[in-house]
Amino acid sequence: MREEINESAAQAKAAPNPRIVKIKNFWKKLTSSKSAVIGGILIILFVLIAFIGPYFTPYSPFDTDTSNRLVGPSMEHWFGTDNYGRDIFSRIIHGMSITLYVGFFSVFIGMTVGVLFGIVSGYYGGKVDTVIMRFMDILLAFPGILLALAIVAVLGSSLENVIIAVGIFSVPVFARIVRGSTLAVKKLEYIDAVKALGATDGRIIFKHILPNVASPIIVQATLSIATSILSASGLSFIGMGAQPPIPEWGAMLSDGRNYMYDATHIATIPGLAIVVVVLAFNLFGDGLRDALDPKMKN
Amino acid sequence: MVKATDILDEQPILEVKDLQTSFFTEKFEVKAVDGVNFAVPKGKTLGIVGESGSGKSITSLSVLRLIQDPGKIKGGEILFKGENLLDKSEAQMRKIRGNEISMIFQEPMTSLNPVYTVGQQISEAYMIHQNMSKKEAMLRSTEMLELVGIPSPKQRVKQYPHELSGGMRQRVMIAMALACDPELLIADEPTTALDVTIQAQILELMKDLQDRLGMSIIMITHDLGVVAETCDYVAVMYMGKVVEYASVTDLFKNPKHPYTVGLLNSLPRHDVDLGDVELNVIKGSVPSPDNIPTGCRFAPRCPFASDICHEKLPHLEQSEEGNQIRCWIYTDEWDGDPEVNVNDQRST
């Protein structure tokens, strides 16, 4: 009997660190998906642009030049100029940080609140669950953009309020996902075991349940960034978000709409920028889901 | 010979009196534990035996007050060191759990959190109850791993549960449960999920630790072999009630309740050659909880059952030999064959 144990101990020492193996497996799966790699690279690129891009733009995003209004793409102005003669390329680069800022922060708000609601709802069950989830159902019953509009209408139109509004409407999505995973995890025996050890509810929820429901949260967060960017741009487009002259892409698109026939590029370029960013997050999110979902082994 | 009556002379660490735990569905109430009485003497092991659904696990969870919705402890008393646990607040209970009363579970494969190392999980007990620093707790965890017989504990303490075998994990569970030196350990089928050689190792370990640390154990099992090996006293449960309570020697030598006899008969023997005889079974199956017999719960399956058994529920009564038995045969009201001897039915 002793021998047997010692033998397995020797084997355990020889085996590579499982955490590294796990990360390697995850990495392998993630990189085997072309779309995830493209999405990931694009996201890294966007983040770099957002941070260092503004220092390298040829023009200020706010400088108007009335002699060069509505000029099409050229060597001087890569993406052309808008109706005030502002350089669109510089504005797009400066807008990148705004777009990512809106995406990340609104998801951060939605995720924090949603995860908290979901985990509490799933863990306690009963009346708490009913109250929270019915409230989430009410939020879900509104079309997202309408709800955000209503919130912005109450809070006043500014970029910060758009972030809050978009954050609020992603709350129920997180709450539902986390509640479902929590229901599954809380039935596992190790939760009973820590309860029998005298752990408080807070400890059980944050230390034992949260890490075990993390992967669906991460996937949802990535996908939510895409939708949040889209919704925020939508709100800015209808004038409820970023106020001029802030180079927000939705607002730029809205500005360009009046010149669709004379200078198509003013509206198309911010539109394309939004598409590319949203697409990158969606591609990456899908790849992440495939890599994190243990059921999808290929 | 130790008799069950002697139990009362020893100071029991835990005394359960008329415990009732029910689960409520929309339509009816399932009485999972229905008036259970037993006592666990200090430093001794009490076995609780019964089929699936007899309420043995629910009894143990009730002791720690870990019954979850829609379950509820309806009544009775759980006296731990003379204090009723049912009167304690949730915060007081948390101080008792893991500190004074610990529990180990059936499935070592799922009883450990996959995202933490075993060291971190054992440390948790110290951090909850003794406010130890992480470093100190980890040091103590390593010592605990050594105590439960895990080789090279310094390496093991940094490993994750999935790197350990089932037997190893059960050792880790035991280390976790015993970290704060509890006075009572509840083991809910600790060996069911393990293979036979590992079972023997774990049982040996538990016995050894009991001798060293002096704790009392409640061993919940459906394996009479485990009972014979580890327990001092046994409570046999059937459908939420204790039907027989005796010292382990009494129970195996001289079982009184027809259900106990049935259980013993269904046990294969390797020391006696019974020839080509088929193993006995208890006929029928446990009635569904929404259709509980009005009389003795075991009457529909009992080979001795007479009229009174089907009509009235017997009480748990002290027999002359000191056992406690819930059976009409041993009372004055018995209306069946007066010469009946349950032990005649014993085939093994």
Image (cartoon, coloured by chain):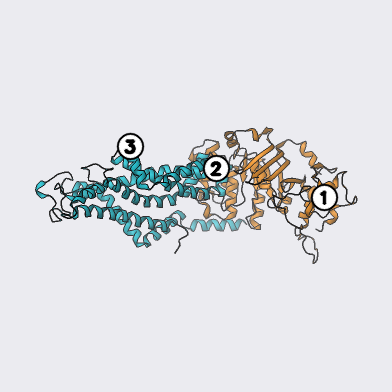
Q: Quadrant of residue A73?
A: bottom left
- At label 3, counting other C-alpha atoms closer than 10 Å, the crowd grade (few under 14, some 14-19, many 20 or more) is some
**Residue bearing mark 1:** B254
Q: Are marks 1 and 2 in contact (CB under 8 Å)?
A: no
Please tell me whether mark 2 sits on a helix, a strand or a loop. Answer: helix
In space, the residues marked 1 and 2 are separated at their CA atoms by 48 Å
Quadrant location of the C terminus of chain A? bottom left
Mark 2 / mark 3, whichever is N-terminal = 2
The amino acid on which the numbered mark 3 sits, given as a three-letter code, is: Leu
**Residue bearing mark 2:** A126
The colour one sees for chain A in the rendered image is: cyan
Q: Quadrant of residue B20?
A: top right
Q: Nearer the viewer, residue B58 or A224?
A: A224
- Whether marks 1 and 2 lie on the same chain: no
Answer left or right for A246 relative to B78: left
- At label 2, counting other C-alpha atoms closer than 10 Å, the crowd grade (few under 14, some 14-19, many 20 or more) is few
Q: Position of residue A104 (x, y in %)?
A: 33, 46
Q: Which chain is orange?
A: B
Answer left or right for B338 relative to B227: right
Q: Nearer the viewer, residue B40 or A279?
A: A279
**Residue bearing mark 3:** A155
The amino acid on which the numbered mark 2 sits, given as a three-letter code, is: Gly
- Whether marks 2 and 3 lie on the same chain: yes
Answer left or right for A89 relative to A222: left
Please tell me whether mark 3 sits on a helix, a strand or a loop. Answer: helix
Please tell me whether mark 1 sits on a helix, a strand or a loop. Answer: loop
Return the chain for callout 1: B
In the rendered view, tell whether residue B331 sits above or below residue A266: above
Is residue B211 at all visible to an observer of this figure?
no
Which residue is rendered at x = 58% and y = 35% of the image? B90
The amino acid on which the numbered mark 1 sits, given as a three-letter code, is: Asn
Going by the picture, which residue comes out furthest to the bottom? B276
